[in-house]
Image: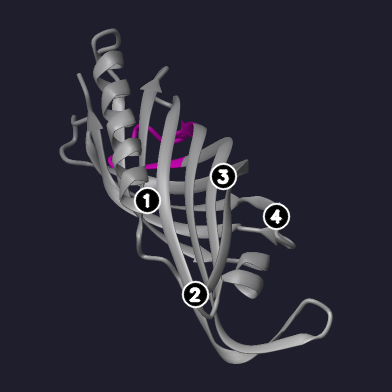
Amino acid sequence: MKTIKIMVAALGLFLISQSATAQKKNLKLDLNYNYSMPVSGFNSDLVRDHSPRGFMAALMYPFNDKLSAGLELGFQDYYQKYPRQLYTIGKSQNVSAVLSNSIQTTPVLLKAKYFPLTTLFLKPYLSVGAGANIVDFKQYLGQFGSGQTNVNFRAQGGLGVLIPFTKVSPSGINIGATYDYAPYNRLGYKDLSTVNIQAGVTINLK
């Protein structure tokens, strides 16, 4: 299931880029590895471990040297196993078991980037995004599991820097970080917010 989601997201972005490139010659494609750290209720209630299993990809249209906007797709896989302890099932039944949480998120965001200092070789930027967060949540108590898939709201704020390959190149290496606000409100849990670190490339599609 996780592999299928990754393939669908990558294929969708590829098809969008190919279609749009035929119409717009100055689109940019951001391809980033994503390292994610659960925070707030996500960290305290569900997953304490960081996730190195993720990516982000965005197709951006630059309106001018300072502002660009477009569509971002991502995927992140979280997993946490807690030590065996006693859990209450129903009103009067207790069971000793290992609790495991497996969560996969697929954000689909409308995103904008602002480059305030375009005359510098290193180009710092601020970013904002908002959209949908597809969440696949499975919880296992011993060998017994339950889960559900939902679509929730997600908002993102970030900063980073683009390091061009050359002084005149529109393509380069991208390094950044984001805070993603992700309310959940399912199964008694309230939050899937994260802090993320990205590294990758920005490719000019001209």
The residue at the far top in this view is: 23
Instruction: Report which residue position mark 1 lands on.
Output: 1
The residue at the far left in this view is: 166
Whether residue 137 sits left or right of residue 170 in the image: it is: right
Q: Secondary structure at mark 3?
A: strand
Instruction: Report which residue position mark 4 lands on.
Output: 186
> Which span is picked out in magenta?
111-125
Picture quadrant where residue 28 is located: top left
- Circle 1 Cα neighbour tier, 10 Å, few/some/many (<14 / 14–19 / ≥20): few
Residue 55, placed above or below residue 95: above
Q: Secondary structure at mark 4?
A: strand
Q: Nearer the viewer, residue 134 or 138?
A: 138
- Whether the residues at callouts 4 and 2 have beta carbons within 8 Å, the answer is no
Across and down, in percent, residue 205 comes to: 22, 23
Q: Nearer the viewer, residue 109 or 174?
A: 109
- Residue 36 magenta: no
- Circle 4 Cα neighbour tier, 10 Å, few/some/many (<14 / 14–19 / ≥20): few
Label 4 – label 3 distance at C-alpha? 21 Å
| Residue type, numbered disc 2 | Gln
Across and down, in percent, residue 7 comes to: 29, 41
Q: Secondary structure at mark 1?
A: loop
- Whether the residues at callouts 4 and 3 have beta carbons within 8 Å, the answer is no
Instruction: Report which residue position mark 2 lands on.
Output: 80
- Which circle's residue, 4 or 3, is located before the other in the chain? 3
Label 1 – label 3 distance at C-alpha? 26 Å
